[in-house]
Amino acid sequence: MTKYYLTTAIDYVNGAPHIGHAYEKIQTDVLARHYRQRYDDVFFLTGTDEHGIKIQKTSAAMGITPKELCDANANKFKECWAGLDISYNKFIRTTDKDHEAIIQKIFKKLQDNGDIYKHSYTGLYCTGCESFLSPRDLTEDGLCPDHLKKPEEVKEENYFFKLSKYKDRLIEHIKNNPDFIQPAFRANEVLNQLEHIEDISVSRSKDSVSWGVPVLGDDTQTIYVWIDALSNYITALGYDPENPSENFKKYWPADVQVIGKDILKFHTIYWPAFLMALDIPLPKTVLAHGWITIDQTKMSKSIGNVIAPKDVMETFNLEHPDAFRYFMMVTAPTGRDGNYSDMEFKERVNADLANNIGNLLNRTLNMLVKYFDGEIKSDFITASDNEIAKEAQKTVESVKSRFDKFEVAEAAQEIVNFANVVNKYVNDTAPWSLAKEEKITECAQVLYNVLESMRFIGAILAPYCPNICQDIYEQLNREEKAVDVKLDNLRWGEIPAGKLTEKEKIKPVFLRLDSEIAGAAKKV
Ligand code: ME8
């Protein structure tokens, strides 16, 4: 049995999901769906991060309890992921009772091991980060570089975690395991931060932060968000310091933990140090994605340019999320920042999904009906060593190796490049001329090559566009589901002889967003 365990960051529930949150969940979903086509047992975890001062303040300002705010917003995240076809296996909320109970045990174990001690402290707290910042982290004007707000000076007696004790082991781990931080160019940033690492506060006084898990045996202190939040990756599997569950033993360590670049330090310094202290193996890879801007501008409530996935769905009257999922995955090289604009979205999905892939299938099926009454004869079936078949098989291998490096955008490009090759092949061989010249077998074999190529494309594109690829499979009269195709079983020549389609059954799998037929879609 091969297993694969993936996680996303868990989102703060002080607001509703926007397309930046969606970017990460789609990226992880595409990875999960791809690995389901290769491995036996994939477990995909996501969820919400619900404790801390940010939630406490937002709910107070709204005149509701923190729990009411969490319930309302956690539901918005779940609804949003359902609308985007995010195929997670578990949704954890840090207010889940079983999670809270284990957090207390984890904290206790760290205390018993001597990794946590009490200490009086004056520090600069950024609510946006839910973290203390060192003066070195601030901008020249003394602001948090991510939230551009002045951190609050906090003077408290808190529990501290001996992060400095793990400094050398962390540096060694990062240097010896080049896969641990991906993309690799981010590792230096972490190594630089490690040079100045100090012990960190892991609790806040209950007087200042009451919305959180109390320290066991000391209810004047609340465990503050990072031990609570990061541990979700193991509590969700049923980790218990006294009795780790079967699921924990089966899935941990995580194969990839997907996060945004802004929380890299927490996932590649704090998290592995907590795991070392608990004597638990480290995740194999932490994959940091870039940030999504809107029209090249940072999304922010104050600018008023925050876009939710449903805004895009409504603007273009989309019946399923595939075009949005696809665009988000190709808007930037994996790991780099990307941008969303209505114009770029429309142009990109029209070019790749409608013109390149959708039209290719549509016109080939129409020719099959016109010249061969929609029927494949046994001498149409081509050998697996013809040039197009070889290109198809090579593309599957390139896509797999891109995914092995988490290069989701680059893998999509491999698929588009292959569709370009097949389009060029159709134009060069001109099956309409072959039909006119009565070169029947030649013409039929060209069509067969295209249909088989589409079957390959339907399988490898399914993680990005599960609905479109299912439609491709239905157009090809396939019984299996595109998302369920195991890539190692994808063999050339499996479209059988027999009736494949008829005129009435042919439908476009993706309409241009500005086409007349897409109709009700607003013109942008
Ligand atoms: O950081 N573009 O929660 P969060 C791309 N609760 N990704 C973005 C983004 C954007 N514009 N805005 C946010 C937290 N994200 C913590 C995580 S994990 C144990 C705890 C990403 O709601 C961000 O990088 O602020 C992060 O990975 C995720 O959304 C949740 O952000």
Image: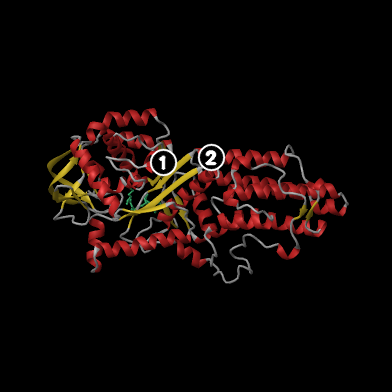
Residue that label 1 marks: 251
Is ligand 1 within 8 Å of the beta carbon of the residue shown at mark 2?
A: no
Q: Are marks 1 and 2 in contact (CB under 8 Å)?
A: no
Residue 227: in sight, yes or no?
yes
Q: Position of residue 79 (x, y in %)?
A: 42, 62
Which circle's residue, 1 or 2, is located before the other in the chain?
A: 1
Residue that label 2 marks: 402
Residue 132: in sight, yes or no?
no
Q: Nearer the viewer, residue 300 or 419?
A: 419
Q: CA distance from mark 1 to mark 2?
A: 23 Å
In front: label 1 or label 2: 1
> What residue type is disc 2 on?
Arg
Residue 513 shown left or right of residue 153 in the figure: right
Q: Position of residue 78 (x, y in %)?
A: 40, 60
Q: Position of residue 132 (x, y in %)?
A: 22, 46
Residue 32 shown left or right of residue 423 in the figure: left
Using the image, tell me which numbered label, if any, was put on residue 516: none
In the figure, residue 38 lies in which quadrant? Answer: top right
Name the residue rendered at 29%, 50% in the picture. 99
Is ligand 1 within 8 Å of the beta carbon of the residue shown at mark 1?
A: no
Q: For the residue carrying disc 2, how many other residues have a C-alpha within 10 Å: few (<14), some (14-19), or many (20+)?
A: some
The answer to whether 331 is drawn above or below residue 16 in the figure is above
